[in-house]
Image (spheres, coloured by chain):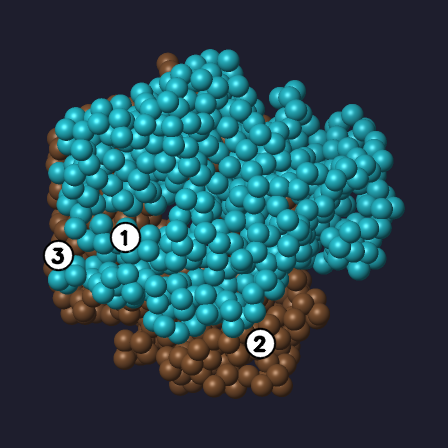
Chain colours: A cyan, B brown
Amino acid sequence: MNSVEKALLTDSHIDDEILAKTLASMMGRKVDYADLYFQASQHESWVLEDGIVKEGSYNIERGVGVRAISGEKTGFAYSDDISPIALQQAADAAKGIADAGTGAQVKAFTRKPAIQMYQSVEPLGSLSQEQKIELLHQVEAHARQVDSRVKQVIASLSGVYDTVLVSASDGTYATDIRPLVRLNCSVLVEDNGKRERASAGGGARTDYSYFFEVEPGANKARYLSYAEEAVRQALVNLVAIEAPAGNFPVVLGAGWPAVLLHEAVGHGLEGDFNRKGSSAFSGKVGQQVTSELCTIVDDGTLANRRGSISIDDEGTPGQYNVLIEKGILKGYMQDKHNASLMGVAPTGNGRRESYAHLPMPRMTNTYMLAGESSPEEIIKSVKKGIFAPNFAGGQVDITSGKFVFTSSEAYLIEDGEITSPIKGATLIGNGPEAMKKVSMVGNDLKLDAGVGVCGKDGQSIPVGVGQPTLKVDEMTIGGTQ
Amino acid sequence: MSTDSKSQDLMTKQLTEVKTRVAKVLELAKSLGADGAEVAMSRQQGLSVSTRMGEVENVEFTNDGALGITVYQDGRKGSASTADLSEQALNKAVTAAVNIAKYTSVDDCSGLADKDLLAMNPQDLDLYHPHEISTEAAIELAKECEQSALSADERICNSDGASFDSFTGFKVYGNSHGQLVGYPSSRHSLSCVMIASEGDDMERDYAYTVNRDFSLLDSAENVGLAASKEVLSRLQPQTIATGKVPVLFRADIANTIWGHFIAAISGGNLYRKSSFLLDALGNDIFPEFLNISERPHITKALASSAFDSEGVLTKDREIITDGALQTYLLTSYSARKLGLSTTGHAGGIHNWLVNAKGHDGEFDAMLKTLGTGLLVTELMGQGVNVVNGDYSRGASGFWVENGEITYPVSEITIAGNLADMFKGIVAVGSDVDMRGSIRTGSVLIDEMQVAGH
């Protein structure tokens, strides 16, 4: 028995027999599939502002979600009380939906340990409270030291220790310990009465020691780089001129600008939308949906990445899934339910915000593989356009394919040279059309710093993105001139 | 009637129980050395069903609770929260909060709201209207809604489902000033998301109805018809030419304009100097005909509350009078930072009424005033910078010529600066959307930059 089983089951007087009995009681009503999802998590955050530690908070979440599936129907109930009685009550409520099905039986549990994509560490205790506070003070001090125009600094640190246990009627029995840490630095700079704010940060599925490490290729610890990056971006925006309005070639920087892939392609390839035929990519497996320069994967197996999962929230191991290969659509991201309805295998993308939410097909780390061009030659190829190395966030309408994302750092490209910084502007396009206009892909694949949060149907989960520098021949830029 | 009064009794009993627990948690915080503490506890239960293409999709029984505690000790603050409401977890949370307060810094501005501002005996705003509904009846309602949309037109080829949600719950707030208050509330809603296609084009749109009182919901048939009308009108959109045009924000999305204004006059952004409306009290922010009033005590309204999340008594306030800013939106903390007094806005605003006497009119009249320009019915992305007022968002809607809608528009952006947009408001319609916390009609702005083709 591992520590997760002890904390979630044994301490609450639940054993294998009760799990099997609960699942069997649901299957008895001709439910095709049932699962139980136990979760306990702890979360802390510390905020330093104006030189003082203003906020500190600690949150506890613990409960069980019970799901019964019959064909396309799902019954779901949950409880913040983990006990045999609460479990049975939730199961009784969830199974109420089923009036048809095959009458499948509960399979014997198989405990197959998944390959660990991250260490089973408890991050909250990896630094003393004094050390956490000292780290935040150092972030602030460094940001102020970089430039005297820095007038305000907010530094925040958070850590999550999440433990889950899934058992299901198909014999699934799996546990996972998921650490997650995040450090952020937000600065306000002021010059001649003009003010700009910017922030930078990072994180990973590990403990707080991550922030003291030096990123490969960098010359200082991560927490110092975040402070410098926030100041740099804010100062760039201080001198930004009005952005142009209209259609231009756009060069997207490596790393975080892959928000483009997440919005323009990723969501549209989630299995639920494609089962329902509501995505702009529905029914297009085998067809060319992007330029042939694009190979895009969703990869839950990268070590310690924010979006990685040893197992998804249905117990399926995290996987490396090729979504688009040289422009051809290979397949969708699936959870068990949609996979079974579409007659394919689950892909390790069944994720949920917590025990109180239903799992859905979701992304993990979504990125484009490197191409042939150097970033310099990509910039040189543009006569008049935009270079956008940083973005704030995006949104997509998966049905029409329209997506937006908003730059937080961008420049004009004039005659093959990067010139003036321009103000933040929203870029809009149509996913399948925009991806066909990708005409150059860089050889500099980079993953984001570990800050992504993806929202779908009101559920937020951590994700990652990545891409090399790439050029889209034409996009609509929402500037003011 | 009998079920209603029975559930009323049950709720009263639960409310009393929770108040007792909150009082115990406050006691515990005190015994652990806190010199001040505040506790908020909520519980919510309900039913959420969805159907798709006439079949049941999800049936969800929700039952959520959470407790949050903040303690103060010698000017230091610590917080903790828990969704696990067992005695053990509550004790752990209180201990954690007290422990955290040992490590945070002394902050002269932190602390409970001033005692004389608290709502010690808050009035009843009639927010609790439970409606006993069986799972089957809830499913029927969702089915009826979706069917009404599906049968409206053969171009409506698919659906992303209809859903009905019904929740009841309560909030209790207590603090070491001796305040212990709480109230129950309910919320019922019905919505559907429809998909239509024509040629290569596929579009989605939705409609919804929401109310604290089930009997005041719009009918399932009407919600379905509204969704079908919306989605059909979007088919075969075009882009428009890049240029500067007048823009009319339809009533259901006009609240976003006021939302940006709220962010700009919120204490947190002001004391951080992160707003384009610093030192703007008394200044003309909008044209002279524009007035915004806050009315927190409208019975049954969705954004009504007798006290804010710090227990401060809410009051009727004028936010904008004749175009000029009358008040910021402050919490105790941001007020102390600014040397002012809290306005009872911890947790947000309470029912705003936007009025433009003499510069209003029904939707058709607003289209006539627009003349030739863009009607925006959907916005995408978060391209709004409240520090400097820069605004750039994805949009879709309709091209209007001489007061008549001509064709749907999508894949464009609209951009400008919020300070100019506020000053450039030409009219606010009397076609008020009553569903949200901001009751506004459509908003016409004289000119914005459009990027299209």
Q: Residue under circle 3?
A: B287
Instruction: State the mark number for residue A29.
Output: none
Instruction: State the mark number for residue B99.
Output: 2
Both labels 1 and 2 in a single chain: no
Return the residue nearer the eye: B351 or B449. Answer: B449
Give the chain letter at badge 1: A
Give the chain letter at badge 3: B
Determine the residue located farthest toward the right in the rendered image. A17
Q: Would you say residue A200 is visible in this rendering? A: yes
Q: Residue under circle 1?
A: A232
Identity of the amino acid at label 1?
A: Arg
Helix, strand or loop under label 1 = helix
Q: Which image quadrant for residue B139?
A: top right
Residue in the picture at 85% in, 43% down = A21
Left or right: where does residue A92 sit relative to residue B188?
right
Residue in the picture at 27% in, 52% down = A232
User: In the image, which is nearer the foreground, mark 1 or mark 2?
Assistant: 1
Circle 3 crowding by C-alpha within 10 Å: few under 14, some 14–19, many from 20:
some
Helix, strand or loop under label 2 = helix
Which x, y percent locates residue A15? 84, 50
Which x, y percent locates residue B381? 34, 41
Tags 1 and 2 touching, CB below 8 Å: no
Mark 3 to mark 2: distance in Å? 51 Å
Identity of the amino acid at label 2?
A: Asn
Both labels 1 and 3 in a single chain: no
Mark 1 to mark 2: distance in Å? 36 Å
Q: Which image quadrant for residue A194?
A: bottom left
Which x, y percent locates residue B233? 33, 27
